[in-house]
Image (spheres, coloured by chain):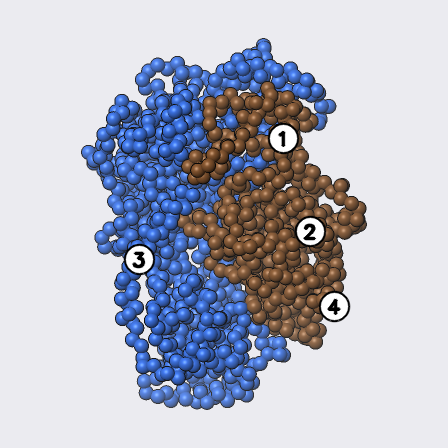
Amino acid sequence: MRTRIIIVGLLAFAGSLWPANLIATRVHAQATPPPIDKQAEEFFEREVRPILVEHCQSCHGARKQELGLRLDSAEGLRKGSESGPVVTAGDIEQSRLITAVRYGDDTKMPPKGKLPAKAIASLEKWVKQGAVWPKEDSVPAKARAGVSVEAAKDHWAFQPIRSPAIPIVKANELVTTSIDSFILARLEAAGLPLSPEADRRTLIRRATFDLHGLPPTPEEVTAFERDVSPDAFKSVIERLLGSPRYGERWGRHWLDVARYSDTKGYVRLNENPRYPSSWTYRDYVIRAMNDDLPFDTFIVEQLAADLVKRDKGTRGSGDKETRGQGDKGKEEADARTLVPRSPDPLVPLSPAETSSAPSAQLAALGFLTLGQRFLNSPPDIIDDRIDVVTRGLLGLTVSCARCHDHKFDPVPTRDYYGLYGVFANSVEPRVPPLIVPAAQHAQFEAYLKELQSRSNQLDEYLRTQHAALTAAVRTRAGDYLLAGQHDPVQANFLAVMFLIDSKKDLNPVMTQRWARHLEQSRKGHDPVLAPWHALARLASASVRHQPDGAAKPAGETSSAPSDKTATPAEFATRASELIAQWPAPADGAPRLNRVVVEALFKPPPPSLAEAAQTYGRLLREAEQRWQRLLKESPAATKLDDPEWEELRQLLMGADSPLTLTIDDVEEFLFVDATTQQQLHAKQRLVTDWIGSPGAAPHAMALEDAKQPADTRVFIRGNASNPGEIAPRQFLAALTRGERQPFQHGSGRLELARAIASADNPLTARVLVNRVWMNHFGTGLVRTPSDFGLRGERPTHPELLDHLASLFTVNGWSLKTLHRQIMLSSTYRQQSASQSANQHVLAAARAKDPENTLLWSMNRRRLDWESLRDALLVVSGRLDLTMGGSSVDLFAPPFSSRRSVYGFIDRQSLPSALRTFDFAPPDASSPQRHQTTVPQQALFLMNSPFLRQQVQQLGARPDVTRLATTAEKINAAHRLLFGRPATADEIDLGEKYLSSATTATAEPVPEGQPQFLSPWEEYLQALLLSNEFVFVD
Amino acid sequence: MLIGNSNSLSSCPGFRARPVSRREMLATAANGFGMVALSALMADGVRANSPVDVTAARRHFPVKAKNVIFCFMDGGVSHVDSFDPKPKLDELDGKPFTESKNPTANGNRQWLKSPWTFQKYGQSGMPISSLFPHTARCADDLAVIRSMKADLPIHSTGVLRLHTGSNNAGKPSLGSWVNYGLGSENRNLPGFVVLSFGVVPCGGLENFSNGFLPASHQASQFQADGTPIHNIQPADKDRRLQQAKLALLRSQDESFSRSLGTEDSIESAIQNYEMAYRMQSLVPDVLDLSRETEATQKLYGLDSKAPSQKLYGIQCLRARRLIESGVRFVEITCPPGASNGTWDQHGALKQGHEKNALDTDQAIAGLIHDLKQRGLFDETLIVWAGEFGRTPHSSGRDGRDHHPEGFSVWLAGGGTKGGTIYGATDELGMHAVENVSTFHDLHATILHLLGLDHERLTYRHAGRDFRLTDVHGNAIREVIA
């Protein structure tokens, strides 16, 4: 309920940011009604408005505005859709509304079925008569603009991070770190106390699960309980932070954000669904955490590791000595008195360096590359990358701006495509680069030799196919021209499986390229193709003027005898009339290519297909001329005759649809079952080898495109509908001062630095909040990946800023932040369930039921990884081997590796992971759900994995060697809960073990799965108990 | 998350007794693991009125259907051979067809008439082909939508779109949305069950995913044979052992949280074991068909000699029993008959479609009859749909390819208008031309029948309010009674 209310409040707030008065003014300024013809008005009301109301306004009205179009007011009509006006008064042919209701091209309105002929006629008449719309009293056109960037800069999260004064509190004796001052200030204002410090056993269990995701050993508990030094807890924290188990725990938290998975999601039939070397990213993350790699460096490497190197001279990884450790007071220093450290110690690589010497850090790019692959659809892959960067690092939902200006946050569509350009200009190397230092190459000699041989086979195959394809598409250029003319441009064209016989059929990828090329060339004037477009218009016009007036829906087959097609005679007559005018153009008429005109002139083509063949013949001749020229003068750059050169450009120029790079070839091969199989077989030669046991590590890397190109806004997210150019640049809302487009390559490094900057108002806040959340169960901002206008406001804004500013000043050190948090009295307090003071508890619960003020520690349930790892710890089986390729956790005999090393298949996530609220790897995950479903209980009660752990636990020699049942019960409690059993518990256990029920258990014959013994049943009950799965 | 227990929400001024917690009940009932206390604890009504976890749990419209059975026709049934007769194809049969733009339909093509004959059935006179003699007798119960239009002619994206409204994985399945929207009627059973035959459809298990919705809305897959749910088989030698162990567990938990008050997470963890315990016996009970009369079993074709037909009959009968027990949404996938359990007959159309029809026709018709005789038909919506239709043309004489441009699905029961034919394809079955409908429209219609407005059933994720229908869809009023 609470959430809802806040959302409504914020909506109202967002609403107030819209410059309503400005919009109203603009609307009035545009409203200059023409003189109204009374008759026309009546016609509109009688004939036209009812059609609009009945058939149009449900999608183009007050409630919805598809394509930005409203047809419920004069203003809406005048404004038109996102691509401009839909009605040109007086001109039916130029009015897209009419084309659409006639079903004349791809836009068919209304989509549910064509209007009756009478209605279409009424609309035509209305447009012809000037599209009169009677004057109205009200102006219903409500603004649909997004949120103004300037106005939204007032939003708290876009303000610069401040360093607030530390509050003075009454209970000063409870302040151990500055965090306590902020927490106590709010508690005291509410009249609530902090809860007392938790006991030692609870504290060490809490700290060990928090930092390692594992339970403490009984020995560690005892040692801590006995340690009387004032720094005892601090020593525990240092020990935990210094262990590699720390990186495995906190690395996993980051992998949630990074939507890490070992597979691509759904792929084509024979494509390898596994990422060959995904695990190197996982290991990079774990290593970065263990090394306390400064978080800004961590960010820059994840976005641009291919463009930077670590500067060993200043600060690099693992410099624990220089920062923080045990340096009392440093992490407590007032941020205002510290000088920010110099920018991140990463040095940009020169272009020469970029292509050489890949370092282990290159694996960091897995952050971008290991998302879902959407059947290799580039706009979707890029969208996923924008999403993981913006929500993951900035807590901002930029993806909403893919189709329209963000409705709640100041992210215009142009900003989305500014980032789109960055990733559209970042490409994956065909073979993931090796990240083995040269010194170790000898160790992998056989592997590398084989890899080289397999890569060569792939390259050779692609080269051969490239040559064959290029020759084939040039020879059939005329066929493609015709096919492209008839092929509708598809928004998200996907070359799909087993479609053609490439030996004889046209390749649909090339056809689609032609369709797009023709669409673009129609918008301007192209001397070579202008005659074609004129003829094509003739052909379609002759279709449109069928006696019944019904235009044929595009894509409808024309070979069905029932279809109405233009008669060849009709076309031929018109075409010859038209062409006859071309050889002697009127003054000022745009130039047409002479060669084309002459070829079409004698004789005029009887059909569009014949015209296409003429083009094909000319293009072949252009190529022959070119080949002849090359023989004579190999250095030639163009044909002498500019008219022929123009044709040659259409055939082989850089912008020609027929020009293929070797990287384009794959898509063409997908569409034929045979070549697809061949391609995947060649690819798998490489990827299977890289994914094989004993393979050397590779990085799932990115690199900048060789020639970065600007991208355009895709109107309504439609890739076939490009709009204005969107320069590659950072988000306006997060830029103070003048915004500059990125200068270097794709702009990835500049983007990374803009994010990993102490001046960025979001990055540090978002990260600090994530860390807080993983210590307390909830964040200071409870929407950890949404700091935008619809996210929740922080419960403690000053504390958040205090932590964020200290974080950047302290060198973006996570470990320093952990110390600061964990040493606080706030962190060390009891959970509510441990509280002895019922009065205080009742008061606190009444005043702050959700514990937003942190009057106690939150009790938390173990997540999947901690639960599974803890079971392995107590069974004595936990295998602490680090790194390497991912392992199957669910196939018996069950692996005893830590859960973080488990294989994650996003296509078919194991049901146990789903059941235990694992972060879905389809998209960046801000926070895990905490659901309670019976399947969890079934797993713990009945799964073979659990049974195995119980049996191992029962066989632990340190328990079995004990003499009495009481001693064994006691040892089990120490092992599982870190405390001895109480007298009651020993009594309970003894009764259970001696009861009649359990005595019926008998041994099962050899070879059968053994049922649990009474003692094992007893141990399982302890493992299932809340004390094992909850942390106080 | 137990709403009733939160102090902050006790807006009601009157005194309302807090429900006795399991823990308290146990403490007062007996010491430890006595059987008396246990049986009291373990016996909970089948239709428990527990508050639901994270659900929207509110109706926007009058409720017509309470439950859904989704018969997923994997691979794409040929519309021109089932519910959309095209006499024009008889005329053109064998004549060449040259302009296929469909990437799965290539080669030298010709029009192909239906190898089956159509007859009119029922008072509505609905034409249905001889593939479905049993379903045909239910003609007046069906609302056939003949004007479906899907997106791409690829199985994976098509199946995902049918299930989740999106071509790509990661979005919640229809069944998850329905559970999120309506909550559970029986907390001892999963609310979304997929009755599967072990064949994972194209698009993967993501088709049944809860996506970003909480895990409580995930699908549970029940296999046709073998162990229906993971870990449902008690690991203990006998029931009393497990009861004793759970009783011990509760005693153990007592000492852990003896301290006080209500702690929701702990309380629900305790309840959860009890629920799992009951599920262990309830699931086999619900799935046990031996108590069904012979007549009922025959109705579903359980006496069939064809193993896949029998299996499909078993799943349909199980679906009815699950619905009766309060499961909200049951999906039945295709049995492993022709083409690995799909209708994807690029070749051997006659044999493959006949095999699949044989496997499914009688059981689905039986399900309709059975629901009617039990008075459940009006509250149970049956959805019969695949990811696309099949081409009216062919590269041979006995096969059809993928055809998303126009095809048929049908709905029955649950407040639909029986005997309805909605929309139309052109005279060759090539394109939906009248009342063109998408999966978004189908989803909106299904939700509408359940009392849910597809535009208001939203879940906040990644800063956006997500819908099953994204930003599209209209409920098709014409098929609603």
Pointer 4 and pointer 1 on the same chain: yes
Q: Of residues A665 and A946, which is closer to you in this image? A: A946
Chain that is coloured blue in the picture: A
Is A338 left, or right, of A638 in this rendering?
left
How crowded is the residue under tag 3: few (<14 C-alpha within 10 Å), some, or many (20+)? some
Reading the image, the residue beneath label 1 is B42
Q: Earlier in the sequence, mark 2 or mark 4?
A: 4
Drawn colour of chain B?
brown
Q: Is residue B355 visible?
A: no
Q: Please tell me how many numbered marks the rendered image carries.
A: 4
User: Residue, x 35% and y 88% (percent of image)?
Assistant: A586
Q: Nearer the viewer, mark 1 or mark 3?
A: 1
The answer for which chain carries disc 2 is B
Q: Are marks 1 and 2 in contact (CB under 8 Å)?
A: no
Frontmost of labels 2 and 4 is 2
- The tag earlier along the polypeptide, 4 or 1, is 1
The residue indicated by pointer 2 is B375
What residue would you read off at disc 4?
Answer: B119
Q: Quadrant of residue B395?
A: bottom right
Secondary-structure class at tag 3: loop
Q: Quadrant of the C terminus of chain B?
A: bottom right
**Disc 1 sits on a residue from what chain?**
B
Vertical order, B459 against A45 (above or below): above
The residue carrying pointer 4 sits among few (fewer than 14), some (14 to 19) or many (20 or more) residues within 10 Å by Cα, namely few
Pointer 1: residues within 10 angstroms few (<14), some, or many (20+)? some
Three-letter amino acid code of the residue under disc 3 = Trp
Q: CA distance from mark 4 to mark 1?
A: 54 Å
Q: Position of residue B263 (x, y in %)?
A: 47, 30
